[in-house]
Structures are given as structure tokens and as C-alpha cells.
Amino acid sequence: MMTNLFSIFDPTTSMMNSSLNWMSSIMALMILPNTYWMLNNRYKMMWSMPMKMMNNEFKILLSIKNNKGTTLMFISLFMLIMINNLMGLFPYVFTSTSHLIMTLSMALPLWLAFMLFGWLKNSEKMFTHLVPMGTPNVLMPFMVCIETISNIIRPGTLSVRLAANMIAGHLILTLLGNTTMSVSMNILPMMITIQMLLLMLETAVAIIQGYVFAVLSTLYASEVN
């Protein structure tokens, strides 16, 4: 059993005499498949409605006229990140998205695939992206360097943004929880109210961070398409 709430950031801790921390990232996926439902129910509608909305939005971002499942990868990425973020809000549940090994393993292959596809299939357009329109001739070499660096650091910014937001929210909730144990009864209702508001904020952040990760990945894909 974990000794404190900070143990959720430690992948080496064990639960029930077995290291199942990384398994928590796929445990929720076991109840998601709805293939075996013959009729539409509330559970199926709860997942189908946001997926349809995300599909329509990603089609616009990718400028796809005939959608044949291209957006499914980004919708699945959003769902995976959102589920892991929300699971991390429960006490003593390992937060896999707070580790760079998890976030970078999602951002780096996507970025590498986009770059390889863009430079091999659309080399001329990739070169034009390095120099924005209206750039003076004197600044063109500097703009090429700046755009190249910005393209290289994209997987790092995607992964660090997600991991940092998850870590920061958990640490704030943990510090307030430890402080609540030693405050007087007069301040206790205010501390509990603040914790409830922060928990609501963290729930929104968990959903928004998954959305931001998926949307930015979609925008990076639209640049090389």
C-alpha cells in the first residue's frame, strides 16, 4: 500500500505486492469497448456524442473533404490522455501522464512521422514554411533558424506541457491536504471549500490538456499535409 499521496509520482512503488502502477493507464480502457451493445444506451451515447464533435472539428483542422478515419488517431489520443488525467485525480492512483516517458512516447513518434512525411512528400512546401510571407530578405536566414528550432522542440513542448500541468495540480492539492490536517476548526470550512474548487479546476485542466495535446497534434499534421 502506498504511504503518501506523493507515491503516485513514483513508478517503482508497489500495490498489493505487485507493481501495477503502469497498468493503471490501461485499466479504464477495459470498460470502454461498446461493440457488444446491440442497442444505444446512455453509456454509448456519452462516448459517441463527444467523438462526433471531435471528428467534425478535426476534419476542419485537417481540411479533409472525404473523411475515411483519418481523425480517429487524434480522437483516440484525446480519449487516452483525458482518461489517464482523470484517473490521476483519485487518491493513490498512479498518474502516468505526469511522467515524460509517457507523454514523450506519444508526442515524439507523431512528430517524427509528420516530419518524415512532410519532407519526403512535400519538400517544397516544407521549405516555404521556414520563411513566413512578407519576411524581409535580411531576416530570412534568422527566420529559417528560428522556425527550424521551433519545429525541433515541438515534441518537447507537447510532452512537458502535459506532464507539468499534471504535476503542478497534484502538488497543490497535496500541499493543501497536508495543511488542512493542522488548521483550526474556524479555517477548516474555508480550506475544504478551496480544495473542492481546486479539484473542479483540476478536472477541467485534465480534459483541456488532453484536448490541447490532440488539437496541436492535428495542427502539426495539417502543416505537412
Image (cartoon, rainbow, N blue to C red):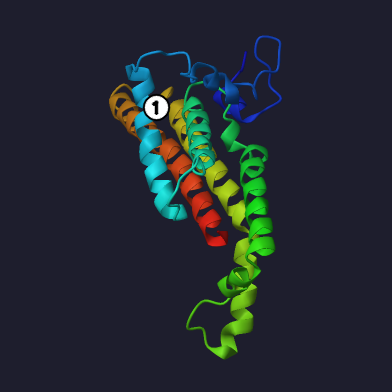
* Among the 4 quarters of the image, the one containing residue 151: bottom right
Residue in the image at 59% along x and 83% along y: 140
| Closest to the observer, 111 or 207 | 111
117 versus 68 height, above or below:
below
The C terminus is located in which quarter?
bottom right
Residue in the image at 45% along x and 48% along y: 66
Residue in the image at 53% along x and 61% along y: 223
Label 1 neighbour load within 10 Å: few <14, some 14-19, many 20+: few
Q: Position of residue 112 (x, y in %)?
A: 68, 53
Q: Position of residue 209 (x, y in %)?
A: 46, 42
| Closest to the observer, 51 or 149 | 51
The N terminus is located in which quarter?
top right
Mark 1 sits on what residue? 47
Q: Position of residue 166 (x, y in %)?
A: 51, 38
Dot 1 lies on which element?
helix
105 relative to 62 in the view: left or right: right
Specify whether residue 92 is in view.
Answer: no
68 relative to 26 in the view: left or right: left
49 versus 123 height, above or below:
above
**Residue found at the far top of this picture:** 16
Specify whether residue 120 is in view.
Answer: yes
